[in-house]
Image (spheres, rainbow, N blue to C red):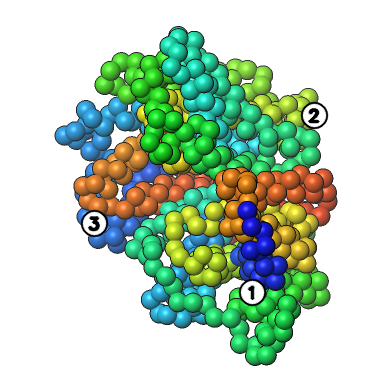
Amino acid sequence: MIRLEARPQPSAVMAYATPVLAVLLTMIFGGVLFAVLGKDPLQAITTIFWEPVFGEFAFFYRPQLLIKGAPLVLIAIGLALGFKAGIWNIGAEGQYIVGAICGAAAGLAFYPTESVFIFPLMVLAGAFGGWAWAMIPGVLKVKFGTNEILVSLMLVYVAEQLLASMSLGLLKNPEGFGFPGSRNLQQYASAHNAELIAGTGMHWGVVAALVAVILAYALLARHRLGFAIRVTGEAPRAAKFGGVNPGRLILFCLGTSGLLAGLAGMFEVSGPAGQISIDFNVGYGFTAIIVAFLGRLNPLGIVAAGLLMALTYIGGDIAQSQLGLPAAAIQVFQGMLLFFLLALDVLTNYRVRLGTGEVTT
Amino acid sequence: MDLSAINPVLLIAAMIAAATPILLAAIGELVVERAGVLNLGVEGMMITGAVCGFIITVNIGSPTVGFIAAAIGGAVLSLLFAFLTQIALANQVASGLALTLFGLGLSALMGQSYVGIKPPRVEATPLGPLADIPVIGPIVFGHDMVVYIGLAIVAATWATLKFTRTGLVLRAVGENHDAAHALGYKVKRIRTLAILFGGACAGLGGAYISLVRVPQWTEGMTAGVGWIALALVVFASWKPWRVLLGAYLFGGITQLQLNLQGAGVAIPVEYLAMSPYIVTIIVLVILSADKSRAPGSLGRTFHASG
C-alpha cells in the first residue's frame, strides 16, 4: 500500500528536481511513442534535443532558439503572475493575435511613410491590443464574477475569426494579387522588427522578454504587489485580511499577461512572421501555459523552460523533415511533459510512504 | 441574400442535431462537477472521442461500434485526469488544461492518415410512419439513435441525482467531501467514476461531430465545443434539464449562423462564426451573478489526512 504523507514544508530539493525528472520521463515515454510510430527513438530524441544546438547546422538553428523562445517566455511570464495568484488567463493565444493585428494595423496605417516613430507606435498599439483583449475577461470577472477561464478561452476563437477577417478584408495587401494576408512588414523598413545583431536571432522581442523577466523577478521578490500576488495564491483569506484588493489584483494580472502576449504577437508579426495571415498563430499562447508550469512560475525558471520548449519546436521541425516524424507527435510530446510535471509535483508537497500504514485516526 | 432558402422545419431538426454534441459533453461534465471535480479537459476528451469513433467506424464500418469506441476513448483519456487529480493530487485547473492540450495533440497524431475520408452514414432511427408525420415527424422522430441517447442520459442523470441513493452520495461528495469521507464514503472512488462517466459522454459527443455533424476528420475539429459545454454547466446552475435547454440554445445559434452563412447574409462569414462564442460569453455574464448553486467542494483537492 502506498500512502501520501503531507510534508510540513514543501521540499526545496523536490521543487527543483521535479521539472528535471519530468523532462527525463517525457524523453523516455516520448521515445516509446516515437518507437511506436516506427522511428528510431534514440535518433529522434537526439534530433530534437541535440541537433539544433550542437549539430552540423547548429549555426542555422541556434538563432531560431531565441526567435521561438522569446514569445514563449514573454507570454509565460505574464501568465505565471496570474497563475501564482490563482487567476487563470488561458486565452493568451487570443491576446497574442489581437496584439499582432493592432501592431500591424498601426504600422500599415502609415505605409509607405518612413519614420523612426512608427515602430514605437506599433509596440504601443500591440501592447494595448493584448491588454484590451485580456481586460474583457478581467472586467467581467471583477464586475459580474464571470469565470475568467471560459471567457478568455472563448475570446481565442473570436480572435481567430477576427484574424481571418482581417487578413481577408481590412488589412489585406492591396497589391497582393487577391491572396489573403497583409503587406509584408519585413519589406517596410520603419515597421520591420529586424535582427539587432545579424545572424543571432536577437530582435526587439528578445529584448522585451529579458526586460519582462527582470521586472517580473523584481516584482515578485521585492515589490508589495508581488507579495500580494503570492499571498493571494497561497492563502486568499489571509490576503483579504491583509488589505489586498482582489479586484485590482485580477485586473493587474490579466492586464499584464494580456499586454505581454500582445507584445509577443506584435514582435512576431513585424519580425519573424512578417505579415498578418490566416494561419499566423501557431499556438504559442497555449504552449506558454506549459512553459509557465515547467518554469515553476518562477521568472528565471521560465527562461530555461521557454528555451527548452523552443528547442522541441525546432527539433520537431528537423525531425519532421529528416525522419518524417509527424508534427502532431511534438504536440503530444509537449502535452506529455505537462502531465509528468503535474503528476510529479505531488512529491514536492507530500512524502510517499510504503507499507501497510497504521489505522488513520 | 435569400432567407426563403431556409426551411424552418429542417432548421429546427438540424438545431436539435447541432445541440447533441454540446448536450452530451455538458451532461457528462455536470455529473463530474456535481461530484466536486472541475475537469477542464472536456475539449481534449471530445476530440479524442471524435478521432477514436471515426477510426473505428471507418475500419469496421459500423457507426454503433464507433460510438462505443469513442465513449471508451474519452473515458480512457479522462482516466489520466483522474490519476492526476485524485491520486497525484494535482491542481484540477492545470490538469484539465493538460488534458486538453494532450488530447488535441494525440487526436491529430492518431487521425493523420484519416483526413479526407468519408465515414459510413449514420442512419436515422427507424421509427416507421412516425417520421412521415408532417412538421413533427422530421423534428421529433427523424433523428439518429445518438440524439435519443443524449436525451435519455439527461433524463437518467436527472432522475439519478434527484431520486436515488447513488445520486445523493454523489452530491454529498460534491458538496462537502470531508463530511462525505467522515460518513465512510470513498470520495476518490466516487469521483473517479464520475470523471470516467464525464469522459465517456464527452467522447460520445465528439464522435457525433466527426461522424454525423461534419462528417469527416480534421485536426481540432471540435473547435471549442468542449469549452462551450463547460460554460453550459455554469449556465445551467448544475441542473440537468437546464443543460438541455442551454444545449438547444447554443445548438440553435450554431446552426442558425451556418444557415445564414449558406443563405448569403450580408454579414461576413467570420463575424457569423464568432457568434456562438460571443453568445456564450454574454450568457455567462448574465448568469454568473448566481453562484450559490455551485457544488461546495467544486475544484478542491481531497486528501484524507491521517
Residue drawn at (72%, 81%), measured in percent from left and top?
A: B134
Residue A247, by quadrant, is top right
In the rendered view, does A19 fall on the left or right side of B167? left
Tell me which residue sits at (65%, 48%) in the image. B275
Asked if residue A33 lies left or right of residue B18, the reply is left
Disc 2 packing (10 Å; few <14; some 14–19; many ≥20): few
- Horizontal and vertical percent position of residue A353: 52, 54
Nearer the observer, A101 or B203 = A101
Pointer 3 residue: A39
- Give me the C-alpha separation between circle 1 and circle 2: 51 Å
Asked whether the residues under the numbered discs 1 and 2 touch, taking CB atoms below 8 Å apart as contact, a structural biologist would say no
Cα distance between the residues tagged 2 and 3: 57 Å
Is residue A286 shown above or below B175? above
Q: Which residue is mark 2?
A: A241
The residue shown at (40%, 30%) is: A175
Gap between marks 1 and 3, in whole Å?
42 Å
Residue type indicated by callout 1:
Val
- Element marked by disc 1: helix
What chain does mark 1 sit on? B
Of labels 1 and 2, the one closer to you: 1
